[in-house]
């Protein structure tokens, strides 16, 4: 990759939430081109994966694959392999930790588990998906920190937990429930689509957007007045995500007809 191409990519992502991810990926690619072997990224959210695909699409001779440890994982690691590399890449180096507690006396959520893990000084990029059940949580992580988690994750908040290694093969593929929503909205403003997709009032939607609970295409949504387009994906903390599948014409009263798919 030439210096001009690298600067063009950096300029495109500069000032956005993707800037740091783009810098890290470009550094990986630069190292890859020198060694002509393979490189493994940290865990990437869907937006980070999109950045990786965009950057690698402009680079000749790089094969890009993803894995999050199980089928349907949201957070995944990127494996970049040079076309001249004739060996076998070392794998994705992903481990699974099972943290168990007494479910009769404690109800823990995803944010509780993530907070406890990051409270140990672990960077978010070292953690993949966290799958929480009534009395256990499966924590997908970088293999390098697996033993550390087993030894040091002894409590989540005030709840005692026992952490141990678990098999990735035991994790069932992610199954998402989908609901189609046909709605008419006053406009294609973000708050109007969020309200229709998640079944809340428009004022509540505006509050959630300003509180940064809503992501637009995996980035901070920003202004509630932002216009939404067909293909956009809205996600809300604790409520899943909504895809704008189709934007149709207007009704006689001037409202816009949209078809949304909500994923739970």
Image (tube, rainbow, N blue to C red):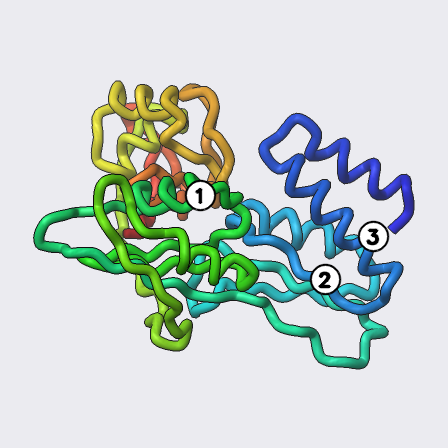
Look at the picture and state if 71 lies above or below 194.
below
* Inter-mark Cα distance, 3 to 2: 10 Å
- Seen from the viewer's position, the closer of residues 31 and 214 is 31
Look at the picture and state if 189 lies above or below 249.
above
Residue name at image x 22 percent, y 46 percent: 159
User: Is residue 34 toward the left or the right of residue 186 in the image?
Assistant: right
- Seen from the viewer's position, the closer of residues 10 and 136 is 136
Indicate the position of residue 26 as horizontal and vertical percent values. 76, 47
Q: Which of the labelled discs sits on residue 120, or is there none? A: 1
Res 254 seen here: no
Q: Which of the labelled discs sits on residue 39, or is there none? A: 2
Indicate the position of residue 157 as horizontal and vertical percent values. 27, 40
Indicate the position of residue 40 as horizontal and vertical percent values. 67, 61
Q: Residue furthest left?
A: 104
Of the image marks 3 and 2, the number of the one nearer the N terminus = 3
Of the image marks 1 and 2, the number of the one nearer the N terminus = 2
Res 20 seen here: yes
* Inter-mark Cα distance, 1 to 3: 31 Å
User: Is residue 204 toward the left or the right of residue 107 in the image?
Assistant: right
Disc 3 target residue = 30
Q: Marks 3 and 2: CB-CB under 8 Å?
A: no
- Seen from the viewer's position, the closer of residues 261 and 44 is 44
Look at the picture and state if 42 lies above or below 24.
below
Q: Residues within 10 Å of mark 1 (few under 14, many from 20)?
A: few
Residue name at image x 36 percent, y 43 percent: 116
Of the image marks 1 and 3, the number of the one nearer the N terminus = 3
* Inter-mark Cα distance, 1 to 2: 27 Å
Mark 2 residue element: strand
Mark 1 residue element: loop
């Amino acid at each position: 990759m030439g210096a001009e191409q690298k600067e063009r990519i950096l300029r495109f992502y500069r000032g956005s939430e993707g800037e740091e991810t783009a810098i890290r990926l470009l550094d990986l690619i630069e190292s890859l081109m020198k060694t002509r072997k393979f490189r493994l990224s940290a865990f990437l959210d869907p937006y980070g994966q999109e950045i990786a695909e965009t950057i690698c699409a402009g680079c000749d001779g790089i094969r890009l694959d993803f894995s999050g440890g199980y089928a349907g994982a949201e957070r995944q690691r990127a494996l970049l392999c040079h076309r001249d590399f004739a060996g076998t890449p070392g794998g994705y180096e992903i481990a699974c930790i099972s943290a168990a507690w007494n479910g009769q006396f404690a109800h823990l959520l995803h944010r509780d588990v993530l907070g406890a893990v990051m409270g140990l000084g672990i960077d978010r990029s070292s953690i993949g998906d966290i799958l929480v059940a009534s009395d256990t949580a499966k924590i997908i992580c970088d293999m390098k920190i697996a033993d550390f988690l087993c030894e040091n994750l002894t409590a989540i908040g005030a709840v005692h937990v026992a952490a141990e290694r678990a098999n990735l093969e035991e994790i069932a593929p992610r199954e998402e429930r989908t609901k189609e929503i046909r709605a008419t909205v006053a406009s294609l403003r973000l708050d109007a689509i969020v309200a229709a997709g998640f079944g809340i009032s428009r004022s509540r939607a505006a509050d959630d957007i300003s509180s940064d609970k809503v992501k637009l295409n995996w980035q901070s949504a920003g202004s509630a007045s932002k216009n939404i387009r067909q293909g956009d994906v809205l996600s809300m903390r604790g409520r899943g995500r909504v895809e704008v599948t189709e934007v149709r014409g207007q009704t006689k009263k001037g409202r816009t007809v949209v078809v949304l798919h909500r994923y739970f």
